[in-house]
Amino acid sequence: MPAHTTLFVGLGSSHGDDRVGWLVADALVPRLGEHAIVRQAAAPLDILNWLDGIDRLAICDACQGTGPAGSWRRWPSPLQDFPAGRARHSHDLGLAASLQLAARLSTLPAEILLWAVEIGQASPNQTASAEVTAVVPAVVDDVLQVLTCQHA
């Protein structure tokens, strides 16, 4: 049994660059193997359904307003000063609020890691931009390095 039960969640949508979390998750599925469970979610609140037995949560999501499109950053646990973002709908909790809810429900894992990729356009029926698509391999490599180095 692995030292950690890790869940990686790629957050996103089908709207242009906002799909970056899904792209990272897709690339991780064949490469993470037994090191993590990999899922995709359209809403951060979905994560709460998957936390049973998880002691490390890794997330990749899009962000806007922190740098040029295609730039990215990893926040180690505990998360501090990460962009909270706003919910798109009144019934949709953002990532920060969803994690706070998990903490209040005592289901939040001990370790949380966040990869945030700065996006440009997030228009419906658009593909991801070249800037965002180009950084997916670097983000994937970083996720692999972080999530598998403790399992060697």
Image (cartoon, grey):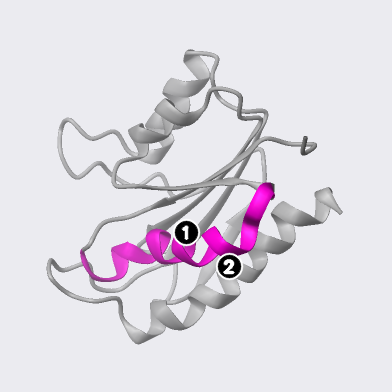
Q: Does the magenta stretch include residue 13?
A: no
Residues at marks 2 and 1, CA–CA distance in whole angstroms: 8 Å
Q: Which residue is drawn at 36% across and 39% down?
A: 44
Q: In this view, does 46 lie to the left or right of 103?
A: left
Q: Do the residues labelled 2 and 1 touch (CB within 8 Å)?
A: no
Q: Does the magenta stretch include residue 28?
A: yes
The secondary element bearing badge 2 is classed as helix
Residue 6 in sight here: yes
Residue that numbered label 1 is attached to: 25
Q: Which residue is drawn at 53% across and 59% down?
A: 29
> Neighbour class for label 2 at 10 Å: few (<14), some, many (≥20)?
many
Q: Residue at x 28, y 44 (%)?
A: 86
The boundaries of the magenta stretch are: 15-34
Q: Is residue 87 left or right of residue 55?
A: left
Q: Which of marks 2 and 1 is nearer the N terminus?
A: 1
Identify the amino acid type marked 2: Val
